[in-house]
Image (cartoon, helix red, strand yellow):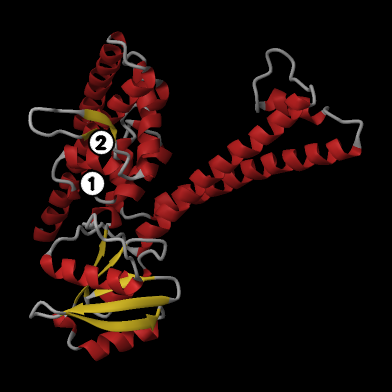
Amino acid sequence: MGLDVHKETITVAVGEPDGSVVDVGKIPNRPEAVRRLIKRLGPVERLRVCYEAGPCGYVLYWELTGLHVECEVVAPSRIPHEPGDRVKTDRRDARKLAMMNRAGMLTAVWVPDAAHEALRDLVRAREAAKKDELRARHRLGKFLLRSGRRAPDGVKAWGKAHGRWLDGVSFERVEQEVVFLDYRHEVNHAVERILRLERALDDAVERVPASQRAVIEGLQALRGVSKLTAVTIISEVGEVSRFDRPRLLMGYTGMVSSEDSSGKRVKRGAITRTGNAHLRRVLVQAAWAYCRRPKLSPALKKRQVSVSEEVKEISWKAQHRLYGRYRHLVSKGKLPQKAITAVARELVGFIWDIAVRVEDQLRRQKRGQTAA
């Protein structure tokens, strides 16, 4: 079955064993309508359903798997397209999904469970709050600059001294005073929102399964990987060991080089950016820590207290390797931003190594407890 899913409707097509495709029609995107459809089409053991990942999320996937139907959510970017096909309708999309699903030509995405999806939503809400805070600060800062208000020399922007200076700012015209108070209220509101979400995130980490919590603690042994970064990695990737090799995880981040080669011509370009943008952002931020010489700061030592010596050794190896990589690229004339992207790509390999080791160790411990 191929399903073209929208907010209100689902267009259904069925690929028969003889190679034909039957249009079933449209049904409402409601749980009761989905149950009636599955009941009408026959035994669930004969059904294999797919639909494209999109804004409707994984609710339909959970409904179908709850009915014991085999279902896959496929990556839209990996669906083959014919260059000459210029007609796109819901019916044709459903037929295409049914045919390609039967032929095994579709790539399924990893679907998190409800608890993991909730953690991911919380992490992304905090990321959105940070973006809103930045926009609010820019609006207030540019308004003050247009009005000729500048903080005294030596006052760091948005610090405590900057806040005290803002308390003394006033305007003669009522209109500007209203704008100033409104902009400042938005900044304060954004700060309070971030603190509230970070407290909720700390509480959520305490509730995650012990296996995920162990991986989060292990990843924090790496320089530049704070608790928030580690939680973001786990929420976006899930179980890291589902990637057989580090290179596959690098491709998932979209930080591998694009390529357009033919015959003897080999041409590699910028990174593909086809992976997870949320994951790529935190990895690049973490990679900036490796432009400085290897060092065990007090904060890093504190994060490494609960990890094994093996993980500490990997972390120290990563510092030397990635710092050397950055210095080498910059010395060859590469822009620091491009060098950091290359460092972030290699950092993924160390993240994969630590996460897989921790997950394997936990699985061995679980098997030993079961055997005992």
Q: Secondary structure at mark 1?
A: helix
- Classify residue 311 as left or right of residue 147: left
Residue 233: x %, y % from top left: 34, 43
Q: Residues within 10 Å of mark 2 (few under 14, many from 20)?
A: many
- Residue 114, located in which quarter of the rendered image? bottom left
Q: Is residue 71 visible from the viewing direction of this image?
A: no
Q: What is the residue that sits farthest to the bottom in this orientation?
A: 40
Can you say whether 28 is above or below 157 in the image? below
- Quarter of the image where one finds residue 25: bottom left
Count of labels in the image: 2
In the picture, measured across the screen, residue 48 lies left or right of residue 151, that is left
Mark found first going from the N terminus, 1 or 2: 1
Q: Which residue is mark 1?
A: 240
Assign a secondary structure to mark 2: helix
- Report which quarter residue 31 is drawn in: bottom left
For the residue pair 352 and 179, the one nearer the viewer reads as 179
Q: Quadrant of the N terminus?
A: bottom left
Q: Residue at x 23, y 38 (%)?
A: 250
Expressed as whole percent of the image width and height from the top left, the position of residue 198 reads 52, 45
Is the residue 144 above or below the residue 234 in the image? above
Q: Which mark is residue 351?
A: 2
- Front residue of 52/87: it is 87
Q: Is disc 1 in contact with disc 2, using a CB cutoff of under 8 Å? A: yes
**What amino acid type is highlighted by mark number 1?**
Val
Quadrant of image for the C terminus: bottom left
